Amino acid sequence: MATGKAAGKEARTREPGGPPPQAGNGAPRPVDLLVTGATVVAFDDAGTVIADGAIAVEGNRIAWIGSAREARTRFRAVTVLDAIGQVAMPGLTDCHFHTAQQFLRGKLVQLSRTQTLKMPPWRNYYLPYEAMLGEEDIRQSGLCAYLAMVSVGTTCFLEAGGPHPDAMGEAADAVGIRGVVAYSTIDADDSVPPSMRMTTRDALRRTESLVKRWSKHPRVRAWPALRQIMVCTERLQVEMAALAVEHGVKLHTHLAEGAYEIDYALARWGQRPAEYLDSLGVLGPHLLAAHSVLLSVEEMELYVARKVAVAHCAFNNYHVGVPRLLEMIRRGVPVGFGTDGAGSWGPLDLFQVAHAARIGQQLVHGTPNHYRGVVSSEELLAVAVRGGVRLAGLGDEAGQLAPGRLADFILVDAGTPDQYPNHDPMFTLASASTGANVRSVVIDGRVVMRERVFLTIDEDEVRAGLDRHLPALMKRFDAAVG
Ligand SMILES: [Zn+2]
């Protein structure tokens, strides 16, 4: 697995960041965590790969990367992770996630066996479900969801918005994942369940206080979120965007996700959804528009001009239309990947989202023109890593294994039969690895999962809690939508 770039990086990594790697008296420098023996895939601009590498961590930051041989003499660590046969890479960011929908995996498919589903699902199933959830339901959903995410290498998530976001934050705090929580705000449309509706004033007040309340947490933040244009007033959308700008965060929403939404916008405002939001002044780099599938030529121009951020949810988007992901990436639209949560149509595994996006984009941009190499797996895995942290507002802080960056990284098994032979670790990661190959996860300098065992929280206890909680909850859901 050795590559020619290893020696160069070793020399380079002695220079930047932090105090000298060795104490002045020649004694090994104390660090909190040392990972040794891994093939380090740094995801930096130089494409650095270090065979038999090491990562030293102090506090919540990477202090040094280099060769394992050198690290053994330079550092004395409180915790050592032996990662021989594994690949170290930065963690992945889920840029569009619904914590509240964690227990809906497969529920709609199950329902469809006995009834004709009402479309769109978000309106007919997800909103009624979210409306009946209490704080404890959300806490349980959060524990289950965040454990699941960490187990497949996700180190950060951006919540789309749901009820009881403080309970999401508490669950994220307990599991040790990094993330952003949000209210789902809806202030229009009387047909929406009352517990999901707020007055405009209340939605703004509660959101601002949530954003402030979580602004000092080491890993968890809160952002404003809008459900989508059909259930939010103009005033709410305009003032939420202003709130996002004021607090230096993003405003998360769903956009261009269904034909019904476009028909509604054209009938009501004579404009398509993105044109309508632009006329309100809501489009901008502060907007994170999940899905963004059904865009006209003019709307794509607006995305490029306003630098609207996009969460591409491959497992859902290809049901909706023909997503022009590659065009967005090539034209400088900030893009990350999302799973859309367990209630959607796919796994919570961003490796698999990247795989699906590659096949989808090959079909959209390549195959019709007999052009085979339209986008590489490696480029799309980089979107999941570096694109994700950029959307999270951590573009300069995380997303690379380099001194001074946040210690958010994962160790992926490279020696299992499905990963062997591993001639090119980056290619294998991008084309053959999935979340199931992730062995250990470090977030904010803390080992959250070690050799697939959680160190922050008792997984069996969470499971036992679910076994007690879930049957009654699902009975209520069946009664509400059946
Ligand atoms: Zn969504």
Image (spheres, rainbow, N blue to C red):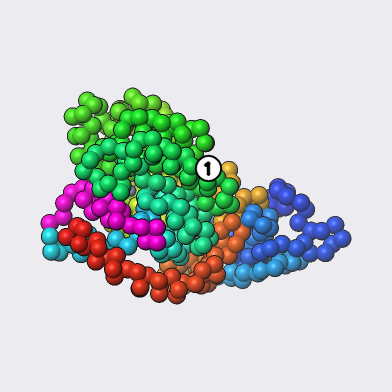
Which image quarter: residue 478?
Answer: bottom left
Which residue carries the number 1 mark? 212
Callout 1 secondary element: helix
> What segment is highlighted magenta in the picture?
116-138
| Image point (54%, 55%), residue name | 90
> In the image shown, does 264 or 189 lie closer to the viewer?
189
**Residue neighbourhood size for the residue with mark 1, other residues' Cα within 10 Å, grouped as few (<14), some (14–19), many (≥20):** some
- What percent of the width, then of the height, locates residue 24? 85, 57
195 left or right of 90? left
352 left or right of 131? right
> In the image shown, does 105 or 136 lie closer to the viewer?
136
Locate the C terminus and report the quarter of the image it occupies: bottom left
Was residue 479 drawn as part of the magenta stretch in this picture? no
Q: Amino acid at mark 1?
A: Lys
| Image point (61%, 71%), residue name | 82
Up-down relation of residue 48 to residue 71 (above or below): above
Which image quarter: residue 345?
Answer: bottom left
Query: Is the magenta region chiefly helix, strand or loop?
Result: helix
- What percent of the width, then of the height, locates residue 481? 19, 57
Observer able to see residue 13: yes
324 left or right of 174? left
Up-down relation of residue 228 to residue 282 (above or below): below
> In the image shown, does 159 or 447 lie closer to the viewer?
159
Up-down relation of residue 242 to residue 342 (above or below): above
- What percent of the width, then of the height, locates residue 84? 59, 70
- What percent of the width, then of the height, locates residue 427? 46, 57
Locate the N terminus and report the quarter of the image it occupies: bottom right
Say if disc 1 is inside 8 Å of ligand 1: no
| Image point (48%, 54%), residue name | 169
> In the image shown, does 126 or 279 lie closer to the viewer?
126
Was residue 129 drawn as part of the magenta stretch in this picture? yes
Say how many tags the image has: 1
